[in-house]
Amino acid sequence: MADRRLQVFLAVARHLNFTRAADALFMSQPAVTFQIKQLEEFYSSRLFERRHGSISLTPAGELVLSYAEKIMALSDEMETRLAEMSGEMRGELLIGASAGIAEFMLPPILGEFNALYPQVRARLIVANSDNIENRVAEPTLDVGLIETPSKRPGLDSEVCRADELVVICAPDYPLAGATEITPKALVDYEYISREPGSGTRNLTESYFLKHKVPPDSLKIQMELGSPEALKGVVATGLGFAIMARVAVERELESGQLLAISLKPKLKRNVHLIYQQDRFRSRLADTFIKFVKIKLREIAV
């Protein structure tokens, strides 16, 4: 177990906010402040600049951060390897996924994995693809599942499956009745988009640009960070959206939404990302192999 003061320091350094760090650690703010004060006294160095309600790392704090991350990673590795020597598959598994993958693909996979390895504590962090990629690179996540290839050096990115993205709309929307539509034709209709940083947003913008449709020419009515919110707004008839077909199967079956194929088709890959050089436990390796198999089994 690494020094608790270093764990607290890392949380404050990552959040740059004592209250948010305390929430993340399930501690009171005064307890977090006390631990940081103790660490500063131990090293005889100020680690944070505190001014006007905000904090930032001092040069000494930056140095401590670089070593604290290595110390914590080695501590986690030691504990994992000791557990593996006993032949047990146990420990904490930190998984990150973009919203669509987390909501529509991972729940049954995590349920199956837990049934096989009940001593494993899987924690799922849901955020947009850019955020997940950054957290795997830090690293504060063991593995990530995102909708676009990784752009960060030092990360491996494997394609696990491919899905078709389709235009979705309400049954009474003007697009209803079409079986396929070109990207140029969509500029005449109201668009409900995902938020900047979303893998789906990045993918659709690249698709429009490839087919000579500037993204700023689209009639964006709303930007939403949740696939469920996106579907709910589209169901009111306010506009169309672009989503993976697998994410709207329930609404298509009930008739709440309609799907229209893009011409040419738009495919989305699900990418599994993890650090290239970081030690990976047997638990992380087992999960990576398991999730790759299970994602390919999901019906397209």
Image: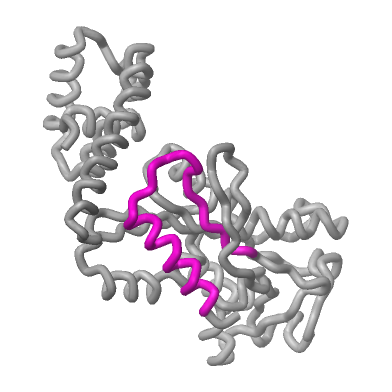
The extreme bottom residue here reads 254
Of the pair 282 and 245, the residue shown nearer to us: 282
Q: Is residue 101 left or right of residue 193?
A: left
Residue at figure coordinates x 73%, y 85% from the top left: 176
166 falls in the magenta region? no
Residue at figure coordinates x 42%, y 69% from the top left: 106
Query: Quadrant of the image for the C terminus?
Result: bottom right
Question: x, y percentage for residue 228?
Answer: 49, 70
Of the pair 92 and 25, the residue shown nearer to us: 92
Of the pair 260 and 286, the residue shown nearer to us: 286
277 falls in the magenta region? yes
Query: Quadrant of the image for the N terminus?
Result: top left
Above or below, comparing residue 63 to residue 85 in the picture: above
Above or below, comparing residue 49 to residue 249 in the picture: above
Residue at figure coordinates x 28%, y 29% from the top left: 71
Above or below, comparing residue 222 to residue 22 in the picture: below
Question: x, y percentage for residue 48?
Answer: 30, 18
Question: x, y percentage for residue 151?
Answer: 62, 43
Q: Is residue 201 left or right of residue 89?
A: right
Q: How many tags in the picture?
A: 0
